[in-house]
Image (tube, coloured by chain):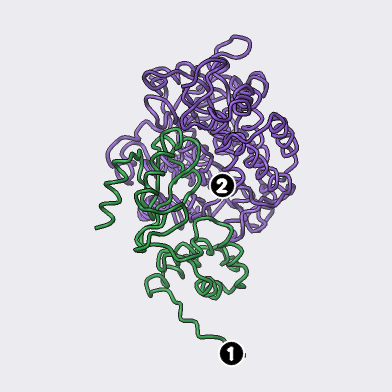
Amino acid sequence: MTEAPNTVAFTPERLAKAKEIIARYPEGRQKSALLPLLHLAQEQWGWVSPEVMDYVADLLSILPIEVYEVATFYTMFHLDPVGKHVIEYCRTGPCCLMGGEDVYGYLREKLGVEAGQTTADGKFTVKEVECLAACGWGPVFQIREKYYMNLTRERVDEIIDELSK
Amino acid sequence: MAKKILTEYINVPGIDTFEVYRKHGGYTAVEKALKTMTPEEVVEEAKKSGVRGRGGAGFPMGMKWSFLAKPEGVPRYLVCNADESEPGTFKDHYLMKMIPHLLIEGMIVSSFALGANKSFIYVRGELMYVIRILERAIEEAKEKGFLGKNILGTGYDLELVVQPGGGAYICGEETALLESLEGKRGNPRNKPPFPAIKGLYQSPTVVNNVESISNMPWIINNGGDAYAAIGVGRSTGTKLISASGHIRKPGVYEIELGVSVDEFLNSDEYCGGVRDGHYLKALVAGGSSVPILPAHLITKTANGEDRLMTYESLSDGGFATGTMLGSGGFIVFDETSCIVRNTWNFSRFYHHESCGQCSPCREGTGWMEKVLHRLEHGHGSMHDIDLLVDISKKIEGNTICPLGDAAAWPVASAIRHFREEFEWHVTHPQEATRPGAVYMGSAALV
């Protein structure tokens, strides 16, 4: 039986980083690198496809199922393609007390999408997430590594306009 | 001015760099511990300090350390729990981003005390920017000889690894965290064996919260007794409180344990009171998991005594009239807040975050969310209110880890103290579902 050629690969810089990460753990414990490598993969491809998971399994010499079961457990990994900017807003209590429901409703309306959807032009994906540990600065959303805090409708306008350029 | 142990220099420009941190007394605890003390003496100071686990459980840290098994030839691990995910809690986030070297210094002396040569800081993955701050600080400390091989020429080796999580509240539970750190799903382990015997990679392991470990430099420099002299009774030292909700000044505050709830809530040094033009309705004092309290039980206990910000005073009266200090997630609700809606929101959180391993939690959190959803949306019945109490009782105490309890308590306490408001949602479905409408007792709506 022949297998399809695996065309997925890290950039040379990320591959070097992946090897450095794997070396952090004790001998025989390289599986500990799984979450860091999935983050690295998502950084490169924007999401984590089955092919990417197989590639990560290969790098760690573990079974593909060991990657699938982990990637599907943790909510940060996007298992479907996403837009250029993924907006993840905190829907949990304290952010809602600070007007989150109104601000997030406005955001969805402005982009014309529901939570979990991507705009037709592929620029924005909106996702609902749970508490982002920034409750005193709510409402909050996150785009990649950046936190946007103390959100208002006006701030949402500014941020979306800036990212739409 | 209250004593500051963790945040005294937090606003000094450049305190996130080694140089500025060092100028303000940073890393002196590493010098003192590694050059003049034995590991046992460091453990002894931690014990004397009485510092209790600041992640929420409140277990004495020194005692936890003393349980660590020390079989010959087996590595031991220290793992810092920086998975801060409890709704209402954002203190560790703040501390790590502002003054990363404090945690690193604490990790060095604590690892030395436990005999660990490789230690981990497990940070929730959403805080990737904080992970980069920590990694940069670790590089600096390594360059200056405070990490790596033969630290300060003492022969002690330590490597620090920062590990990102993947977005899972459950990984704040210490055995789920260890599973996650091993590259697995975050399913909590059955105990025993406890991590002190078989933890990371089946080796003896201590898991401590960021804030707990960050107290260690001060404890080493000033002594455990000096730490224990701050605070009240068994609530020693200071505590970071994350204040959010309807207050004038949300943010992270370091308090001496024992300050009154009234002072913390109303003085300008801290929260500055409920936002202008509004008044207090309810408080969640220690993160979303702890029982919610109605206005009349917040600043006074049921006996009429002043309620203090201590482990003991906040839990005075048990769950009937008290709550818990927990992680110090202080969420304030004014009269515009709908308790039913908030309880539904919290239940949705626990349902989303249940790992699915134990049936009572996996199924029960889903049922609670569904029943609360229909109550909040005007489709509930009186029977539903009792049903919620019944489900919460069947989850509580029947799961491997405390997430089940954490999901049950907010629901049970909300009904205990605000039952009328739940009933009003049943008897007045149209008013209750009007946007912004809130139950105000028998009379008006807001």
The residue lying at 50 percent from left, 70 percent from top is A49
Q: Which residue is mark 2?
A: B169
Q: Which chain is purple?
A: B
Q: Which residue is mark 1?
A: A2
Rendered location of residue A135, percent (x, y) = 44, 37
Q: Residues within 10 Å of mark 2 (few under 14, many from 20)?
A: many
- Mark 2, secondary structure of its residue: helix
Please tell me whether residue A23 is drawn above or below residue B413 in the rendered image.
below
Q: Residue A146 versus residue A12: which sits nearer the camera? A: A146
Q: Determine the chain carrying the residue at label 1.
A: A
In the picture provided, is A109 more to the left or to the right than B63? left
Q: Which quadrant would the C terminus of chain A be assigned to in this image? A: bottom left
The residue lying at 55 percent from left, 76 percent from top is A58
Q: Residue A34 versus residue B221: which sits nearer the camera? A: A34
The residue lying at 43 percent from left, 63 percent from top is A82
Q: Amino acid at mark 2?
A: Tyr
Rendered location of residue A148, percent (x, y) = 35, 45
C-alpha span from label 2 to label 1: 41 Å
Q: Residue A118 versus residue A30: which sits nearer the camera? A: A118
Q: Which chain is green?
A: A
In the picture provided, is A3 more to the left or to the right than A135? right
Q: Residues within 10 Å of mark 1 (few under 14, many from 20)?
A: few
The residue lying at 50 percent from left, 60 percent from top is A77
